[in-house]
Image (cartoon, rainbow, N blue to C red):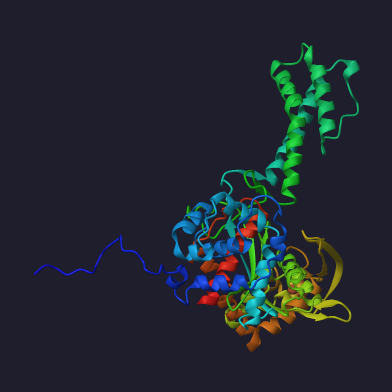
Amino acid sequence: MSPKFQSYNQQQNWLFPPSIEELIPKDHPVRIVNGVIDQLNLDVLISEYNKEGKPSYHPKMMLKVMVYAYMDNTYSSRKIEKAMRENINFMWLSANQVADHNTIARFRSQRLKTIFKDIFKQVVMLLAGEGLVKLKEVYTDGTKIESVAGRYTFVWGNAIKTRKVKMAEQLEQMWNYAQQIADEEDKDPNPPNFKTIDKEKVEQTAKKINRILKDNPKASSKHKAKARYIEKNFASNLDKYQEQEEVLKGRNSYSKTDPDATFMRMKEDHMLNGQLKPGYNVQISSQSQFILHYTLHQQTTDVHTLKPHLETYEKLYQTLPEIVTADAGYGSEENYDHLEKKGITAYIKYNTFDKEEQTYKSKKRKVKEDFHRDNLHYNEEQDYYVCPIGQRMNKVYESERTTKSGYKQLNSIYRAKNCNGCPLRSNCHKAKGERTIQRNHALERHKKLIRERLTTTEGEKKRRQRTADVEPVFAHIKYNRNFKRFTLRGIEKADLEFGLHALAHNLKKKVA
Ligand code: SF4
């Protein structure tokens, strides 16, 4: 008996050709994308299209394809074009139209660039309308994502400063040499100030040095060559450094192949050598693992990103969250102050919070901690501290410090008397002379409030929830979706690229 097979005939004709839609299951994620984007108002996007010339692909179709591609982990425009040709889900979304990869790339990087935040907001508002998220409470965190830039294309701010100092030193050395061998009429009793150099000063000084050395028999050929080199290169080098400093805008580094990217330490260090890589600091605010807001920053630390992140949140949604929970990387006087002024309740640890909690649990360390400045009695009315033996520590001066972002912090300095000979000296402090303590009263007030808030049942719940809310979002995007490096160059395009990932993440989460 021969084996039995089902009928196989590739030439079989359909009596009624099936529609593609019938082939897509009712609960397939592609239907969610289609349904959500059908509800969006795309008037602004549509208004940007030219009214003349060859008809364009409909932006609604292009947007559906783009968002679904990101949900499907298909990011390259060539792969999206292929999917529009071969993948039934893409074919259904595009109604069998196939845009070429250049059109897809242009739609992503040019058409969506200015409008995408509004599209993202509309989707979040739809989620809010369905009761899946509330805008009033967010969990904020950041991660570093590598830029598309080359890894060895760095320009370092500190290196520029060092080179400028070296140039000034070399110029001064050459000046002194020239003056030693100069004829009487070329001697200059008023040498230039080499502490600060600019292009004009370098040009004039180099010219003068060369004039003295040129036909001077006392000048060595080595010094003559060096003087010629200085005249030829130093002024143009200064121009180059100035241009680089303008790109740096206060940062310490940038990449030559993506000047918006800053060199940062990444968690994903596949070579395990702690090497800095060009990238962006991505900040998100999430709730119930949905991303409500995202921003890209060029700073390497999170502490200065919270304020601009919340400012753009307010601009986007015309409201601010009432509660913000974040990790200790955001705990600073400036941030606490800003949140307080905006009426936002902060559940944000300060950097010594965990250590303090452990210390109170450890008896051994408790003895030492009795001498800690936090445990000294403070007389607020008369503004003095009482040291462990009961003596007054009077305020000796105040010092003001301005942070990178321009925020002013005030520190008060208090000093004890007669520490030498005190029986508690060995336990109290190790510094020579009298004990001095420095206090930032504004920060201490915030820390007290935060400590009280974080140690309540609600505070503990928020701390636990933070790790279950915002951290898995990054884990999902970076490890499950394998997005560890941007493919678009420049902060604006990288912002759009992350936005597409964030939108795809939200829709995937909605499907789940
Ligand atoms: S060492 Fe100085 S600060 Fe410490 S208890 Fe003695 S007097 Fe006070």
- Left/right placement of residue 94 relative to residue 496 reads left
Q: Please, which residue is most extreme toward the bottom here?
A: 457
The x, y position of residue 357, in whole percent, is 62, 80
Q: Residue at x 81, y 30 (%)?
A: 202
Which of the 4 image quarters holds residue 239? Answer: top right
In this view, the residue in front, 495 or 227, is 495
In this view, the residue in front, 152 or 35, is 35
Q: Is residue 421 visible?
A: no
- Left/right placement of residue 460 relative to residue 438 reads left
Q: Residue at x 42, y 69 (%)?
A: 18
- The correct choice, above or below, for 214 with respect to 169 in the image is above
In this view, the residue in front, 402 or 144, is 144
- The correct choice, above or below, for 352 with respect to 244 in the image is below
- Left/right placement of residue 481 relative to residue 331 reads left
Q: Is residue 236 visible?
A: yes
The x, y position of residue 351, in whole percent, is 66, 71
Q: Residue at x 71, y 65 (%)?
A: 43
Q: Quadrant of the N terminus?
A: bottom left
Q: Which quarter holds ligand 1?
A: bottom right
Q: Please, which residue is most extreme toward the left here?
A: 1
Which of the 4 image quarters holds residue 134? Answer: bottom right
Q: Residue at x 57, y 74 (%)?
A: 35
Q: Please, which residue is most extreme toward the front here?
A: 15
The x, y position of residue 430, in whole percent, is 69, 66
> How many circles with numbers are drawn on the protein?
0
- The correct choice, above or below, for 231 with respect to 24 in the image is above
- The correct choice, above or below, for 128 with respect to 302 in the image is below
Which of the 4 image quarters holds residue 307? Answer: bottom right
The x, y position of residue 110, in whole percent, is 66, 53
